[in-house]
Amino acid sequence: MKGIVIPDGYKSIIYKIFVTAAENEFDVYIVGGFVRDLFINREPKDLDIMVCGGKNKTDGKLAGINFSKILANKYKLPPPVSFEKFGTAKLLLNNKEVEFVMPRKEYYDANSRNPHTQLASLKQDALRRDFTINALFLRLKDMKILDFTRQGIEDIKNKIIRVTDIADAETIFRQDPLRILRAIRQSLQLDFKIEPRTFSAMKMSSTRIKIVPSKRIRDEINKILIADNPSKAFILILKINLLNNVIPELQNLKQTRKHSLASAFARTMKIIDSIRNDIVLRMAALMHDIVEYSKHKKLCVKTYPYKSQNENGKEIELILGRLKYSKEFIKKTTSIVQNGIYVKTYSSQWTDGMVRKFAKKCGNELDLIMEFSEAYYAKNDERIKINELKKRIEDLKSKNTFYNSQILTGMEEVINIFNNPAG
């Protein structure tokens, strides 16, 4: 395996797997994204081990499960978590989760991305995977790379994302449309280009994303948001007509031409790239213009006809609730957007009491809200107001007048605080 080095954190794990496999006549392979990351010197994770054979020649579908049990027994580990329907097991080795799988073929129903599985050859397993760069196998007994698509290594060298079977590209995405978002996300993370026929098939299958559970879409959005330059991914999502099925409110922002909104989408993309890599800050940036304009009935009028003061919060709750974000995450995002917009109303006429009231309303998100405001409002007059408000907050803190003081209400409390006896 010339040119590929196993990271120190995985050397012991892989050695244990290799020795145990040799002792029990199993053939074992590292598969998937872990092998790809070894090629590009990227810190790998999600170690998947494909298992075949074994001394007892048991059902091949159970080879991975049986092998994981042997490993757990040998190294006195907690028993693996097994999924017999899929022939997989998960085991904690050296505090890292390792998944053991069988080589398999997959069959899909028309309205589900959850496959029926069947024992298969190594080549069949490689070809049922999503992209050539994720279909490489590393055979542990001789450290040889197996590239059944004959394209994986070249695509890694040329930084290309391509489906494993280009002649049947649309079927690959139709069977599991989450692969569309995975292609975009991996393109962003790895700085790879998507091969044209693969990109075309993604566009043709984009409406199929409706069969994917919202929480899986949410997970991909999260990974995109914390990557460098997430705007690149959202622009690709827009280009393949997927945005309307993921965050239609953002699509509406792009399409609207009234009241100088043509640049609103571009501004949002610029902000999510420039703001600090914090998922709540970046989600707030993504939501800001959506609620800022829809509350004035310039966007989404039929879907969100709210007139109350809580319109912003309701819209964010609807969007993020649809994507199965937690209540706490929604609350934080809403606070940053609402209070970030409120910062714009600051003036020198605010009394210290008003500043304290604003800070109290912001609560634990005060620092995030000020950081968000600085990133979002770049005009000179806006920046001057934000800086003045920040200075006033710091001044109140330095004078110990930022928080309302507690009144001591009894002798017992005084005695406890000053640790003095009564009298």
Image (cartoon, rainbow, N blue to C red):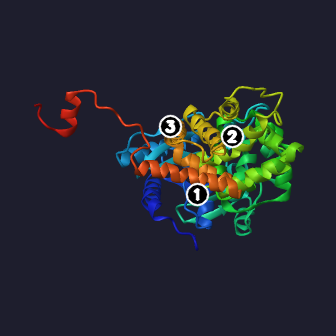
Q: Amino acid at mark 2?
A: Ile
397 sits left or right of 362 in the view: left
| Mark 2 element type | helix
Instruction: Give the number of callouts.
Output: 3
| Mark 3 element type | helix
| Distance Cα–Cα, label 1 vs label 3 | 47 Å
Residue at numbered disc 1: 34
| Mark 1 element type | helix
* Front residue of this view, candidates 179 and 24: 179
* Front residue of this view, candidates 231 and 162: 231
Residue 416 position (above or below residue 390)? above
Residue at numbered disc 3: 360
| Distance Cα–Cα, label 2 vs label 3 | 34 Å
In which quadrant is the C terminus drawn? Answer: top left
Label 1 with label 3: CB-CB less than 8 Å: no
Numbered mark located on residue 101 in the image: none
Q: Amino acid at mark 1?
A: Phe
Residue 274 percent across, percent down from the top left:
66, 58
Numbered mark located on residue 217 in the image: 2
Neighbourhood count class around disc 1 (C-alpha, 10 Å): few under 14, some 14–19, many 20 upward: many
**Front tag of 2 and 3:** 3
Instruction: Point out the tag, 1 or 3, that comes first from the N-terminus.
Output: 1
In which quadrant is the N terminus drawn? Answer: bottom right
Residue drawn at x 75%, y 26% is 306
Residue 278 percent across, percent down from the top left:
58, 51
46 sits left or right of 247 in the view: left
* Front residue of this view, candidates 117 and 285: 285
Residue 316 position (above or below residue 153)? above
**Residue 118 in view (yes/no):** no
